[in-house]
Image: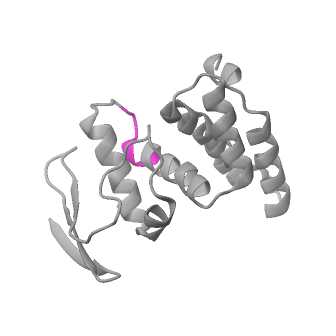
Amino acid sequence: MERTGRKRGGVFRWHRGPPFTNTLAFTYAATVNRYDPSQAPDAAEWLDLDELERVLLVEHYHSRARVDLPDLKLHATIHVIAEDQLASHDEVVVRALARLIEGGLTRHEAIHAIGSVVAEQIYDLLNLGETPEASRARYYAAIERLTAADWRNG
């Protein structure tokens, strides 16, 4: 299956082949066309991409790296949520990333650590029935408490 589409003057093409061979090709210049969690994507270019494009880029990275994951799409989606918060300059998350890296984690590990709090937040949103404000406050408090040592110790 192949789909093409236009986005802000450019063209993207998505081809879905056999399992784990999704490819996403961008033909417009100055846009993120590859994801590497060890380096921050350009914030404006990252956020300019469609959410599906971001998820596919993260999936493609993990497929290329031959990372065996129980749910590649979920893993990629949580990466995207963390990267979106960083690209949006969410101060609490930006501080957490710096703290985690300073604590000895790689950027990729720090994205996973932040993602673990994101996953807990999603679970709690679905199960606790909190107001959005209470949920957001609890999320930010958990991000503020997150340390590299805690992440390493599980």
Closer to the camera in the image, 35 or 79: 35
Closer to the camera in the image, 125 or 87: 87
Considering every residue shown, the one lying at the far bottom of the view is 9
The residue at the point 76 percent across, 47 percent down is 139
> Which part of the image, by quadrant, shows the C terminus?
top right
Residue 10, horizontal then vertical, whole percent: 27, 78
Q: Classify residue 36 by image quadrant.
A: top left
The residue at the point 74 percent across, 41 percent down is 143
Magenta stretch: give its range. Answer: 69-74
Q: Classify residue 68 by image quadrant.
A: top left
Q: How many marks?
A: 0
Residue 127, horizontal then vertical, whole percent: 72, 50
The residue at the point 61 percent across, 55 percent down is 85
**16 left or right, relative to 61:** left
Q: Is residue 5 magenta?
A: no
The residue at the point 40 percent across, 58 percent down is 54
Closer to the camera in the image, 132 or 64: 64
Q: Classify residue 61 by image quadrant.
A: top left
Q: Is residue 94 above or below residue 150?
A: below
